[in-house]
Amino acid sequence: MVDVFSGRLLVSKDGRSVDPEEALQNKVVGLYFSAGWCSPCRDFTPVLCNFYTELLEETEPPAPFEVVFISSDHSAEEMVGYMHAMHGDWLALPFHDPYRHDLKKKYNITAIPKLVIVKQTGEVITDKGRKQIREKGLSCFRNWLESADIFQNFSS
């Protein structure tokens, strides 16, 4: 994951700049392509919030998982509003970073919402993260972890 965001900064929900190398190291990462104007996105985001909260706040130790929001909002203000209103405490690529368009191409994003689960290298584990969370809940995380080549003492 460090490779994918190398040389870039991410932002937290509260607007702090975050070094992706530290924040994403040894984690399974969900690239969340979404927007506040998108009704299916607003439908899935609370589901993703619950999934994220259960993995990070209700397991000991916290699961090695992070979400990076890649916005398709129409403005930086819309993006920030959507993050504050609905998002979990995850990270985002800044709105004005043109790299978000490259990521959409790289991961073949033709419709949103899309949750692409990736390894540290940026290699895709699944591009059906949304469907898997809806169908399997927390149990899908173990499969992602096994595919991610991350060695952790994690049990859900």
Image (spheres, rainbow, N blue to C red):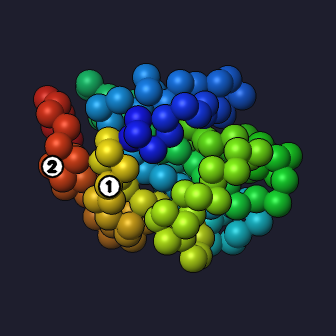
> Is the residue under label 1 in contact with that under label 2 (CB below 8 Å)?
no
Residue shown at 14%/33% (left/top)? 151
On the image, numbered disc 1 is attached to which residue?
Answer: 123
Amino acid type, residue under disc 2 in the picture: Glu
Q: Residues within 10 Å of mark 2 (few under 14, many from 20)?
A: few
Give the residue furthest to the front: 7
Task: From the viewer's perspective, tell me whether residue 149 is left or right of residue 126.
Answer: left
Residue 47 location (% of width, % of height): 49, 57
Mark number displayed over residue 146: 2
Amino acid type, residue under disc 1 in the picture: Glu
- The residue lying toward the viewer, choosing from 130 and 149, is 149
The answer to whether residue 145 of the structure is visible from this angle is yes
Residue shown at 14%/29% (left/top)? 153
Residue 155 location (% of width, % of height): 16, 37
Q: Is 88 rendered above or below residue 116?
A: above
Q: Is 155 rendered above or below residue 111?
A: above
What secondary structure is found at the residue carrying circle 2?
Answer: helix
What secondary structure is found at the residue carrying circle 1?
Answer: loop
The C terminus lies in quadrant: top left
The answer to whether residue 58 of the structure is visible from this angle is no
Query: Which circle, 2 or 1, is nearer the viewer?
Result: 1
Residue 105 location (% of width, % of height): 55, 66
Task: From the viewer's perspective, tell me whether residue 123 is left or right of residue 51.
Answer: left
Residue shown at 85%/46% (left/top)? 77
Give the residue furthest to the bottom: 110
Q: Is 130 rendered above or below residue 53?
A: below
Along the polypeptide, which appears first: circle 2 or circle 1? 1
The N terminus lies in quadrant: top left
Residue 148 location (% of width, % of height): 22, 47
Using the rendered view, name the quadrant where residue 55 is placed: top left
- The residue lying toward the viewer, choosing from 117 and 99, is 99
